Image (cartoon, rainbow, N blue to C red):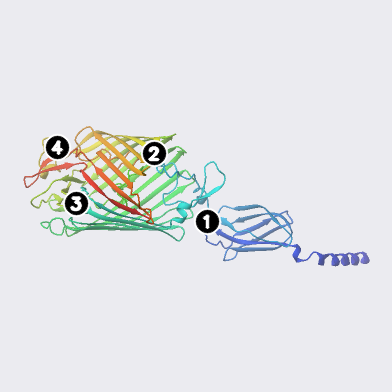
Amino acid sequence: MLRKFGFLVVVLGMALPGFSADRFASVSGYVRSSQGVPQMGALVEVLGSAFHAVRLFTDENGFYSATGILPGTYDIKVSAPSFLPSLRERIGLRPGSAATINVTLSTLFDAIQFGPVRDAKDQDDWKWVLRSSVNRPALRIFSGNPLAGYDKQNSERDLTGTLSFVAGSNASGYGSNGDMSAAFRVERSMFSAGTVAISGNLGYGDSIPAGVVRASYTHRMSNGSAPQMALTVRHFASPDGALPSTSLQAAELTAGDDLNFANVVRLKFGSELETVQFMGRVTSSLRPYGSAEVHLSPDTVLEYAYSGSAPEAEQPNGFDPLPAELSQPGPRMSIMQFSPALERIHHHELSVSHRAGKTNVQVAFFADRVANPALVGVGEFSSADGNVLADPNSGTFTYRGGDLATQGMRMVLERKIAADLKATLDYEAGGVLDVGAGEDSLDSVSSSMIVRNRQSVAGKLTGDVAKTKTRWAASYRWINGQALTPVDMFNVSPGQADPFLNLFIRQPIPGAGFLPGHMEAVIDLSNLLAQGYVPMMGQDGRTVYLVQSARTVRGGLAFSF
């Protein structure tokens, strides 16, 4: 037996040198998150047969290295707390080879951010894509194709900006910009997951100087959250020397978040804290907001929304505002007997949206309470009036209306007629503010205002002209009686349209191809026929008009890069 054992030892001793280190294989690499952060302590398993399995952990740099592995075919599984496991299958290791396998771990929220690429000509999918507007991953899954595509437009445009010069009256009451204004917006990606934006609008010309500047930062988290913070500062000089200290200064701090859960629920929430200094007084207002979308199916969305402020001026579906103008409305301020007050809003809305082919349908029910509403009139005053804030440059003024409490409903039908033409029909029913019977004096109109039930129908067409690359939108809203406020004051659906006849055109200027960006001419016409004007007698005996929407004609140039 001893001789047999010794013979076996000699044979093994002769065989082992032939199976040297170069007959083994190795595998190494780095483990990172989808944001590129190294993952320390991640478990890496090199799985072959039960007798050829290696388990190890990554170091502080997310690095792992497994050596002395017998040649063969292996699977590499990587797992870490709060991440989905990652599996790389059928990795062939040859004798003496050193394979490098880097692994990216994703969370559940990272996974649901992959969705169909949106058509560049169809940027108004309402709520069908459950993704934040700032949460646009560069890697997307193409519909009907198992391969991933690279979104070059979003990945390479780290810096974008717009500069516009616009002339014409705003006709939006006290607190608006001048008859001439220069607006700008610059947006830049930072830290691979954040976006910094700075925008502003500076009024000048013959009007009273005015300025608005806004800075914001949005960060896209790996869990699907998109928190945002913004600071807006406004200054409007005194329009009338007869009213002392009527320059308006305001600072607004906004904080919010946008969360998506399992491709079913989307939550948006936050608040706005605004401080206004006006006529020697300081007034503050906290305005929370929030909404919850539930995707009952890929084509049906149920949403509840609450808002404590006026909706953004920017309108969806091609009915764009002037380029680079701030979409956040300014402080809604009015006075009564020289006493200023901010507009207070409570808006609740429940809506159901459904898509069927090229047709989108929405039904919504809303309830509004507005205290100290800041309404708009047209006309000039020869002396100071303690109940109005007049802007002599634009010929408009702001006055305080009666409190409004109303409930109503809205139905929207949107149809894509052609690739470059879309039609929208909007029906609304609810309460509006109107002057009392026989009232014709501006001094007492606020106390005599009443709420009347009204119905409104709006039609809107938006389209593109392919040959000239012209973008245009035309709308007309009809209401079945006199009204000083819209039927649905907080309509932000695709059916939103300003009262009466409106036209908007954006026309690229040919011959500007030598510029690094592109230049456009912009025309914005509101209430072109000057409808809905209600005559009133001012304190100085002059006739002024209360309007739901003042007639405005504005135009200018916009440069985008």
Q: What element carries label 1?
A: loop
Tell which circle, 4 or 3, labels the residue nearer the N-terminal end: 3
**On the rendered structure, is 461 left or right of 402?**
right
**Label 1, label 3: how many angstroms apart (C-alpha)?**
49 Å
Q: Can residue 324 be seen in this view?
A: no
Q: Which amino acid does label 2 sit on?
A: Asp
Q: Residue at x 11, y 38 (%)?
A: 439
Expressed as whole percent of the image width and height from the top left, the position of residue 226 reads: 42, 53
Tell which circle, 3 or 2, labels the residue nearer the N-terminal end: 3
Category of crowding for the residue at label 4, using alpha-carbon neighbours closer than 10 angstroms: few (below 14), some (14–19), many (at least 20) = some
Q: Which amino acid does label 3 sit on?
A: Tyr
Q: Which amino acid does label 4 sit on?
A: Gly
Query: According to the image, label 2 marks what residue?
Result: 420
Tell which circle, 1 or 4, labels the residue nearer the N-terminal end: 1
Query: According to the image, label 4 marks what residue?
Result: 436
Q: Which amino acid does label 1 sit on?
A: Ser
Screen quadrant of the C terminus: bottom left
